[in-house]
Amino acid sequence: GEDVEQSLFLSVREGDSSVINCTYTDSSSTYLYWYKQEPGAGLQLLTYIFSNMDMKQDQRLTVLLNKKDKHLSLRIADTQTGDSAIYFCAEIGSSNTGKLIFGQGTTLQVKP
Amino acid sequence: NAGVTQTPKFQVLKTGQSMTLQCAQDMNHNSMYWYRQDPGMGLRLIYYSASEGTTDKGEVPNGYNVSRLNKREFSLRLESAAPSQTSVYFCASSDRMNTEAFFGQGTRLTVV
């Protein structure tokens, strides 16, 4: 079945780079997403990548996709305290209904 | 720009009580979703509605019912609340398949 896995916690120092990893099982996924959730808030789309791409860069964010290994990563350059949040990886399920399959979420802690 | 609006934001129920969570979107989206978020488990899909007039079960539908009242509104009903339904509930909408989903701010429900 469809499954998305993430590590639960990452701690970095302000100014360092953060790399959040994700693995997924559905090889037919067309889009893969990264969402950010700040405390007490809903989810906000950060970026996404189409499955025929290897990399996508958007300002401080870099998404890498390895389709062979079904591995997705999000790199945040020059991490700031405002980046502290939970980051969710998600894929579109193969049933093509638009429903997202989420990972458990990675809590990013940025220390000053 | 309201986006996706959920009510209420907080609710405490006694076991066996019923209630309806309301969701409305003003983006003319076709698809709407209800997710629940539990610690360490990411977001799990309860029900979704791919278009007005249709609803389908997601990953964890037991104990819930939904109504797609019109294109704007998608409600989630708990007929007889149980402590296992203590969670944060998110409504989301998207324009069509494989596009960005927009999330509401969430409803924090506690069943005692």
Image: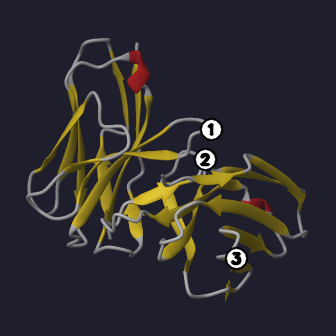
Q: Which residue is mark 1?
A: B40
Please state which of residues B49 and B28 is positioned toward the viewer in this rendering. Answer: B49
Q: Report the amino acid beneath label 2.
A: Gln
Residue found 41% across the figure and 17% down from its top: B83
User: What chain is tagged by disc 2?
Assistant: A
Residue B28 image point, x, y percent: 20, 73
Q: Report the amino acid beneath label 1.
A: Gly
Q: Quadrant of residue A46?
A: bottom right
Q: Report the amino acid beneath label 3.
A: Asn
Badge 2, how many Cα within 10 Å: few under 14, some, many 20+? many
Please state which of residues A31 and A78 is positioned toward the viewer in this rendering. Answer: A31
The CA span between labels 3 and 1 is: 25 Å
Q: Quadrant of residue B8?
A: top left
Q: Nearer the viewer, mark 3 or mark 1?
A: 3
Residue found 72% across the figure and 46% down from its top: A8
Q: Which residue is mark 2?
A: A104
Please state which of residues A46 and A22 is positioned toward the viewer in this rendering. Answer: A22
Q: Quadrant of residue B65?
A: top left
- What element does badge 1 sit on? loop
Disc 3 and disc 2 in contact, CB within 8 angstroms: no
Residue A94 image point, x, y percent: 40, 65
Q: Which residue is mark 3?
A: A66
Q: Nearer the viewer, mark 3 or mark 2?
A: 3
